[in-house]
Image (cartoon, rainbow, N blue to C red):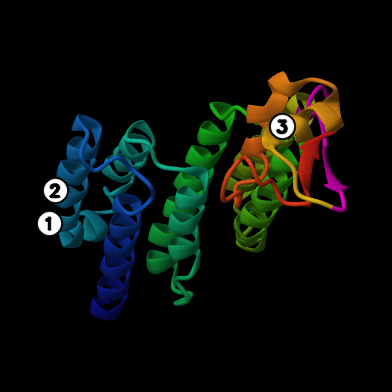
């Protein structure tokens, strides 16, 4: 590994660690403190870890700690994008970047597995983001003829798609409504569903409501 390669690889590793700390974790929690400690230790020894090729295990620990500390699906995808954005094609640099990408994808799938979705549209949005996230990593592995990585990525991708697709089936869709006038939340719920008890559900689907006595004359509602 040349000096220039090591410098870029170390910078990439540190950027990933910084992104993990900003991935939506609860910084005030004990898990957040653990994550900061783990990331700080790896960053401090980044040169030696990259030079020796031993960064994989402590980096995997950092990713798991981020998820335990409350990292969000979107936040973890942003970590992936940081790693995916490393452009130097040299193998020592890409080894750092692609390992980080794969770890981020794995945690994204783990986060989704523990997510409760309210509608099929929510799952559709997650699926679209998952497909976009996996494609560059799968293409990179295929382009480098790394069959082991490619098979692992495609298997994880397929398992995630199957899980989300199965969970989407029983969920309602969100449909749009439109009336000619504003009305109170309870009245609107009764008009749409014949059940004022679903008012909170309706409120949750229209987050821009200023006051429940004056619901917008158009918005979104669950289909069933």
Residue 151 in magenta? Answer: no
Mark 3 lies on a secondary structure that is helix
- Per the model, the C-alpha gap separating discs 1 and 2 is 5 Å
Pointer 3 or 2: first along the chain: 2
Quarter occupied by the N terminus: bottom left
Place of residue 40 in the rendered image (x, y in percent of width and height, measured from the top left): 15, 51
Q: Residue at x 77, y 44 (%)?
A: 220
Span shown in magenta? 168-180
179 within the magenta span: yes
Sequence order check: which comes first, mark 3 or mark 1?
Answer: 1
Rendered image: mark on residue 152: none
The label on residue 164 is 3
Return the x and y of residue 162 as percentages of the image width and height. 75, 30
Q: Which residue is mark 2?
A: 41
Query: Label 3: how many residues lie within 10 Å, few (<14), some (14-19) or many (20+)?
Result: some
Residue 47 in percent (x, y) is at 18, 62
Describe the element under mark 1 as helix, strand or loop.
helix
Quadrant location of residue 166? top right
Q: Position of residue 77 (x, y in %)?
A: 51, 53
Q: Is residue 63 above or below residue 141?
A: above
- In whole angstroms, how far apart are the C-alphas of marks 3 and 2? 36 Å
Q: Secondary structure at mark 2?
A: helix
Q: Nearer the viewer, mark 3 or mark 1?
A: 3
Residue hosting label 1: 44
């Amino acid at each position: 590994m040349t000096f220039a390669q090591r410098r870029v690889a170390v910078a990439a590793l540190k950027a990933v660690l910084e992104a993990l700390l900003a991935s939506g974790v609860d910084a005030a929690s004990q898990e957040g403190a653990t994550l900061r400690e783990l990331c700080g230790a790896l960053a401090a020894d980044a040169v030696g870890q990259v030079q020796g090729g031993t960064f994989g295990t402590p980096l995997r620990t950092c990713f798991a700690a981020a998820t335990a500390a409350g990292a969000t699906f979107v936040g973890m995808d942003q970590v992936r994008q940081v790693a995916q954005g490393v452009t130097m094609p040299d193998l020592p640099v890409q080894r750092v970047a692609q390992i980080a990408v794969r770890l981020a994808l794995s945690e994204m799938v783990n986060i989704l597995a523990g997510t409760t979705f309210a509608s099929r549209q929510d799952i559709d949005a997650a699926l679209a983001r998952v497909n976009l996230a996996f494609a560059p990593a799968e293409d990179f592995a295929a382009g480098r003829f790394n069959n082991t990585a490619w098979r692992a990525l495609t298997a994880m991708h397929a398992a995630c798609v199957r899980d989300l697709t199965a969970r989407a089936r029983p969920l309602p869709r969100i449909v749009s409504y439109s009336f000619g006038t504003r009305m109170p939340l309870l009245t609107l719920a009764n008009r749409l569903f014949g059940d004022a008890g679903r008012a909170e559900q309706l409120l949750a689907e229209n987050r821009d409501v200023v006051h429940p006595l004056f619901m917008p004359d158009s918005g979104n509602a669950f289909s069933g």
